[in-house]
């Protein structure tokens, strides 16, 4: 009977209406094998689906025990696609410049990376051990073969005292290259690792930080300032962005159009959605299934732990036979579960208990009272979550399908939705591969949103009925913008927020100006700071690049104050990112020539390291941005 339970999904037992495959495979996570267009191309070079899927599989297998949701799979595929783009454009540059790895360079790489080799060969050794164990006829044969295999392993895998000299001897032996992982590592060094390092060296060769720049930077860092600072916060003079007139937003945009160009194709949609929640009938069916498991525990010799491992939908406790840790006091679990667990005698099993998480079958493993008199219980459970059935999903989808039919027949989308008591919402601007913020990932949404020349079907104004685990949705394409256009749309709220912040800063400055005379009586020798409403006063000791309250870190505002104000004098109120400030410079101490020269030497070296890293990163990003990329993920993995 346990085998039967393990093979069947809960909905088969509950309503006998769903095929086994429904619960086993998320169709959006595998490619449509019938498609004839490429998964993707980079400068005319095709990304092989087999290589792409292999890379995705490797990443997911390395995340042992992690369950990937559809949205996480989509994000993972996007990241893997970007990794292919980067790999291919760099390989083009390596080939163009005739770069390659010599035998001496490869050997040097191996010698310097003993721990990497240890890890690679160790993983392969573990895989071989598993194969030996699984292919042995019995435990005795497995043990004999395992001991023989362990004796053949290189010493650096089993001996922590293994030396670099012994490692080098192993590298020079033929035994080292009988490992598939070593051959793959050699290929990676030859085709990728070493040529990429050579390319980085060439790209960074033009980086030459000057001692003059380094001296300027070091002086800013070592120079010490003694200041008196009075600041006013934006929070005390906040302006509601909604109060900013649209005409002011448009005026700001017209004055700065080149600051607001559309960086990528974006789309805005109207959408109607229905929460995907289980019905009362779904709940009853799941309870019937939970009762089936409960009766199974009572009517057979099946152990609670075994059934928990097979049937519980709480992955953390299922692996432990349903156990929920050690003895637990009240307050750790939700009330319904807690009441049932504390009511059970040791060894007793409860009927299904409903909580916000689903139905729990609880087994008590005893109660005790600790030294402080607190009662505790040790419990295990089998959790069956309550999810919508296929009938519920179909009924909700049918509502939106009817809405689509009505809208496509000529009725306005909002009007048709209103007749069906459905609310229509409007999304923010959505880029390719993007999602509606409220819903998260929806299968088929990306392929609906933007046209693709490889699409096997025309893209209409209305989507199909889309769904994930939380919603069913129907979307309507409202507006679109093409990369390169100067448009206010995507930036309207940002501009309005900027204008509101500017208005707040202006009000803060005006207020600080009105109380300026009360602050300027504050002398450096005063032990008590002035008390002025909405004004924070403090003595500050900092470098030009350091933090000053009301101004921030390394702000150009502080540099401007040092240039325009004399030591010993107060300035005038100045607007800042966080409000407004009034500053008095009490003293400026400069570093000694010896300290400055030492800092300059260090600064030149650090500047080179940082600049070379930055220039290489910028170079790679420019290569990726300029590449001719065809991305068909939205169609290739369409549900």
Image (cartoon, helix red, strand yellow):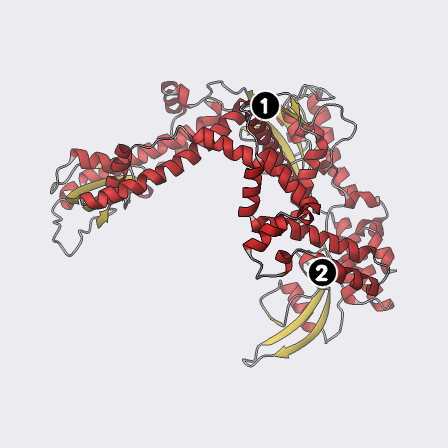
Please give left or right for residue 490 compared with residue 352 in the image. left
Crowding around mark 2 (Cα neighbors within 10 Å: few <14, some 14 to 19, many 20+) is few
Crowding around mark 1 (Cα neighbors within 10 Å: few <14, some 14 to 19, many 20+) is some
User: Circle 1 is placed at which residue position?
Assistant: 478
State the CA–CA distance, disc 1 to disc 2: 69 Å
- Residue at 65%, 43% (x, y): give it: 59
Q: Looking at the rendering, which quadrant does residue 275 occupy?
A: top right
Please give left or right for residue 341 compared with residue 208 in the image. right
Image vertical order of residue 379 relative to residue 78, above or below: below
Q: Position of residue 281 (x, y in %)?
A: 78, 49
User: Circle 2 is placed at which residue position?
Assistant: 151
Q: Is residue 28 visible?
A: yes
Q: Could you say which is closer to the camera, residue 343 or residue 61?
A: 61
Q: Could you say which is closer to the camera, residue 304 or residue 630?
A: 630
Number of numbered discs: 2
N-terminal label among 1 and 2: 2
At numbered mark 1, what does the secondary structure look like: helix, strand or loop? strand
Q: Position of residue 460 (x, y in %)?
A: 68, 21
Report the quarter where the N terminus lies: bottom right
Q: Position of residue 421 (x, y in %)?
A: 65, 34
Please give left or right for residue 467 compared with residue 228 in the image. right
- Residue at 12%, 41% (x, y): give it: 567
Q: Is residue 424 visible?
A: no
- Residue at 71%, 57% (x, y): give it: 152
Q: Could you say which is closer to the camera, residue 338 or residue 58?
A: 58
Q: Looking at the rendering, which quadrant does residue 269 occupy?
A: top right
């Amino acid at each position: 009977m346990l085998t039967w339970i393990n093979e069947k999904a809960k909905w088969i037992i509950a309503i006998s209406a769903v095929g086994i495959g429904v619960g086993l495979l998320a169709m959006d996570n595998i490619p449509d094998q019938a498609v004839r267009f490429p998964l993707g191309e980079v400068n005319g070079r095709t990304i092989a689906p087999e290589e792409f899927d292999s890379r995705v599989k490797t990443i997911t297998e390395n995340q042992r025990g992690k369950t990937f949701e559809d949205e996480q799979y989509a994000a993972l595929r996007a990241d893997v696609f970007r990794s292919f783009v980067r790999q291919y454009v760099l390989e083009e540059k390596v080939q163009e410049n005739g770069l390659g790895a010599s035998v001496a360079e490869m050997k040097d790489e191996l010698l310097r990376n003993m721990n990497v080799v240890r890890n690679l060969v160790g993983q392969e050794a573990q895989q071989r051990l598993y194969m030996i164990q699984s292919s042995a006829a019995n435990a005795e044969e497995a043990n004999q073969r395992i001991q023989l295999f362990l004796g053949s392993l290189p010493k650096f895998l089993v001996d922590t005292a293994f030396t670099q000299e012994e490692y080098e001897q192993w590298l020079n032996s033929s035994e080292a290259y009988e490992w598939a992982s070593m051959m793959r590592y050699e290929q990676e060094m030859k085709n990728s690792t070493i040529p990429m390092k050579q390319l980085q060296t060439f790209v960074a060769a033009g980086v030459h930080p000057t001692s003059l720049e380094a001296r300027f930077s070091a002086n800013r860092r070592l120079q010490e300032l003694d200041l008196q600072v009075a600041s006013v916060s934006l929070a005390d003079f906040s302006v509601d962005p909604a109060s900013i007139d649209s005409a002011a937003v448009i005026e700001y945009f017209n004055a700065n159009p080149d600051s607001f160009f559309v960086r990528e194709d974006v789309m805005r949609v109207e959408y109607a959605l229905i929460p995907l929640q289980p019905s009362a009938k779904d709940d009853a069916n799941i309870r019937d299934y939970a009762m089936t498991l409960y009766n199974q525990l009572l009517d057979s010799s099946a152990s609670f732990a075994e059934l928990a491992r097979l049937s519980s939908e709480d992955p953390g406790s299922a692996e432990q036979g349903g156990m929920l840790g050690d003895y637990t006091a009240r307050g750790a679990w939700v009330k319904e579960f807690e009441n049932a667990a504390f009511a059970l005698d040791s060894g007793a099993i409860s009927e299904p208990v409903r909580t916000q998480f689903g139905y729990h079958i609880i087994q008590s493993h005893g109660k005790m009272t600790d030294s402080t008199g607190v009662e505790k219980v040790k419990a295990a459970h089998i959790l069956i979550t309550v999810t919508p059935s296929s009938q519920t999903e179909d009924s909700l989808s049918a509502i939106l399908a009817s809405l689509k039919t009505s809208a496509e027949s000529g009725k306005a989308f909002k009007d048709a939705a209103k007749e069906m008591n459905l609310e229509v919402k409007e999304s923010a601007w959505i880029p390719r591969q993007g999602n509606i913020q409220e819903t998260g990932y929806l299968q088929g949404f990306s392929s609906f949103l933007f046209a693709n020349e490889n699409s096997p079907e025309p893209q209409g104004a209305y989507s199909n009925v889309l769904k994930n685990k939380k919603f069913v949705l129907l979307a309507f394409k409202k507006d679109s913008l093409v990369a390169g256009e100067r448009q206010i749309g995507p930036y309207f709220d940002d501009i309005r927020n900027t204008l509101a912040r500017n208005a707040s800063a202006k009000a803060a400055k005006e207020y600080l100006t009105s109380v300026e005379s009360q602050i300027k009586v504050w002398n450096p020798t005063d032990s008590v700071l002035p008390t002025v409403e909405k004004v924070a006063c403090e003595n500050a000791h900092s470098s030009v690049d350091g933090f000053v309250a009301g101004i921030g870190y390394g702000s150009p505002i502080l540099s401007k104050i040092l240039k325009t104000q004399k030591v010993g004098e107060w300035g005038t109120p100045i607007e800042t990112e966080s409000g407004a400030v009034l500053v008095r410079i009490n003293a400026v101490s400069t570093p000694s020539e010896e300290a400055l020269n030492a800092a300059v030497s260090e600064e030149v070296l650090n500047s080179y390291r940082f600049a070379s890293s930055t220039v290489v990163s910028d170079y790679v990003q420019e290569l990726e941005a300029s590449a001719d990329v065809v991305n068909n993920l939205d169609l290739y993995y369409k549900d």
